[in-house]
Image (cartoon, rainbow, N blue to C red):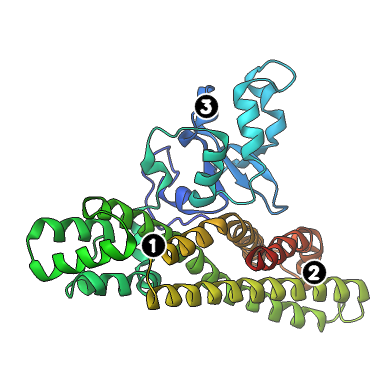
Amino acid sequence: MMENSDTPAKEFGSRNLDYEKDSMHILPLHIIPLETPGLRQARMMKNVALESAIEVFRGDETGSGQVDPSRLGRMFDWPAGGKHPDAILIAKLSLMQSFDIYTLRMQLRQLGVNIENSEDLKLSSAKTAKLKKHMKLFMQPLMDMISDETGQNSKSIGETTAEIRQSGNQESLGNLKSLSKKLQIILEQLPVFLGSYGDVFLSLAYFKDAFENLVPKVQKFNQHVKSLQNTDGLQNDAYFKEASTATCEELQEVIAIIGKRFAAFDEQTKDMWNDLTASSFQDVKTLIESNHGILGGVLCGLSVKLAAWEDNMEASDNSPRRQADFILSDMKPGVDTIKIIARSAQSHFAI
């Protein structure tokens, strides 16, 4: 299952709110300023068809109770015609291809929605710590510019910069002043400025970590499909062989495209450090932020599909025929949509 049961839940009964806000396929509705109290206890989720559904209850005995967003008006006695503010907001949010916090931030800004608790739109501390290995490529050159001791420092770049300003260390302070001049930012504003960039690079680390976790799962799925195609009862099933092969090829294409995208990000970042200016810093920031929606859409779709496959493989009735039917009914539909989003990444990068 997609939910990590090893992490203890904090609130909302058995729900793990840190897991929910770190995920791509779940939007906990308590963070959205909705007028309907009962709806704030629910969450929006992406199902295996990559459609948005509202989960109004979940339990070990009852399973997951999900409804289409368009049916909420009947449940909560909203006025007919979809004019209730919550109905309008939910309808717009349901169109998102990923519910990761970075894509969500972007969407909420576009909708003019103000979130009271900014912590709800940040990764959990546990997730942030996990992403530290991916941050090194992006942030270590900057850390090296301002201090010789930051390699062992777990603080953010913004916090580190602020501490250096207050410490009185003349060498490190001189480094900060030099960096301030390069970036054309006054020294007093540098901690906040660099802190915002640290968050941008954290977003890239978040997507990169998700991608690296998904690649072996795609490979494992593709290998399993090839094995299924040669089992008794399926080796002569021409339709299954053609459809499953096409699904595997589409998944492989998606992985290749996104892999090239991350390689391009790495190259752009290296080029930025080789010739650091305010313009090159801003260009990389803009490039990363403009890709949040695309990366989120592709990686969310892949994670939902592959998690569904893993759940299916754990079922008691797991015959080759049943696996083949699941591939045709649940895995294949929607993969072409993921591929279209991934291909849009190529043209977007070219632009």
Nearest the eye: 91 or 162 = 162
Nearest the eye: 347 or 227 = 347
Q: SS class of the residue under badge 3? A: loop
Q: Residue at x 54, y 22 (%)?
A: 36
Q: Is residue 294 left or right of residue 238?
A: left
The quarter of the picture where residue 217 lies is bottom right
Q: Residue at x 8, y 67 (%)?
A: 170
Q: Residue at x 47, y 57 (%)?
A: 4
Q: Is residue 280 left or right of residue 50?
A: left
Mark 2–mark 3 Cα distance, whole angstroms, equals: 42 Å
Q: Are marks 2 and 3 in contact (CB under 8 Å)?
A: no
Which quarter shows the C terminus? bottom right
Looking at the rendered structure, the kind of residue marked 3 is: Leu
Instruction: Using a 10 Å C-alpha cutoff, classify the residue at mark 3 as few (fewer than 14 neighbours), some (14 to 19) or many (20 or more).
Output: some
Say which of marks 2 and 3 sits in front. Answer: 3
> Where 332 sits versus 151, above or below?
above
Q: Is residue 266 visible?
A: yes
Residue 226 image position (x, y, % from top left): 76, 82
Q: Is residue 137 left or right of residue 323?
A: left
User: Which mark, by number, is residue 278?
Assistant: 1
In the picture of the structure, the residue carrying the numbered disc 2 is: 324
User: Which mark, by number, is residue 34?
Assistant: 3
Nearest the eye: 242 or 133 = 133
Q: Are marks 3 and 1 in contact (CB under 8 Å)?
A: no
> Where 122 sits versus 13, above or below?
below
Say which of marks 1 and 2 sits in front. Answer: 1
